[in-house]
Amino acid sequence: MKTAAGLHHIEIYVSDLVVSKQFWSWFLGLLGYQEFQVWDRGFSFIHETTYIVFVQTAEKYMDIEYHRCRTGLNHLAFWASSSDHFNETVDSLRKKGITLLYEDRHPYAGGADYRAAFFEDPDRIKVELVDPS
């Protein structure tokens, strides 16, 4: 269902399309996203009516690395489908060698009122997975 306030899509430029596709295909697949589009300089995944697009950054723009504390995107936050799904995904992140941010405060680094896991994609974009309970 399309709504006026619903998010249509997000587009993210990445430094290494192959590495980003490996990471995001795995993670978004755990959340129920499906591969949507693939072309020589990008790919996208869709869930219901929202999709996320990843595009290879042009060489002439690669001189300045992304940092989430600069102006622009800070992080993407996704809902886990259940507390079990949240716990399984956190276990999978650790098994893949993906470091949890704020490990000393996990899973309450986002605030005392909800459980969340924070980690980074290959370009150091912060990703948050929120436990729905």
Image: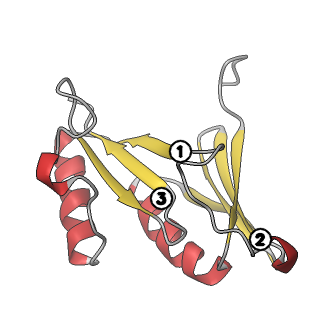
List x then y, in percent, for residue 21. Answer: 58, 74
Task: Check disc 1 and report its element: helix, strand or loop.
Answer: loop
* Amino acid beneath label 1: Asn
Q: CA distance from mark 3 to mark 2?
A: 21 Å
Residue 128, image x, y percentages? 38, 47
Give residue 125's position: percent from left, percent from top. Answer: 51, 58
Of 44 and 115, nearer the camera is 115
In this picture, residue 25 sits left or right of residue 94: right
Q: Any mark on residue 57, and which?
A: 2
- Tag 3 secondary structure: helix
Q: Is residue 58 above or below residue 50?
A: below
Figure quadrant of residue 29 = bottom left
Furthest residue to the top? 4
Residue at 24% across / 50% down in the picture? Answer: 85
Quick one: 4 or 99, which is closer to the camera? 99
Amino acid type at circle 3 is Leu
Instruction: Read off the residue under disc 3.
Output: 28
How crowded is the residue under tag 1: few (<14 C-alpha within 10 Å), some, or many (20+)?
A: few
Residues under labels 1 and 3: Cα distance? 18 Å
- State whether residue 104 appears in this view: yes
| Residue shown at 51% from the left, 78% from the top | 22
Q: Residues within 10 Å of mark 2 (few under 14, many from 20)?
A: some
Viewer-side residue, 34 vs 93: 93
Q: Earlier in the sequence, mark 3 or mark 2?
A: 3
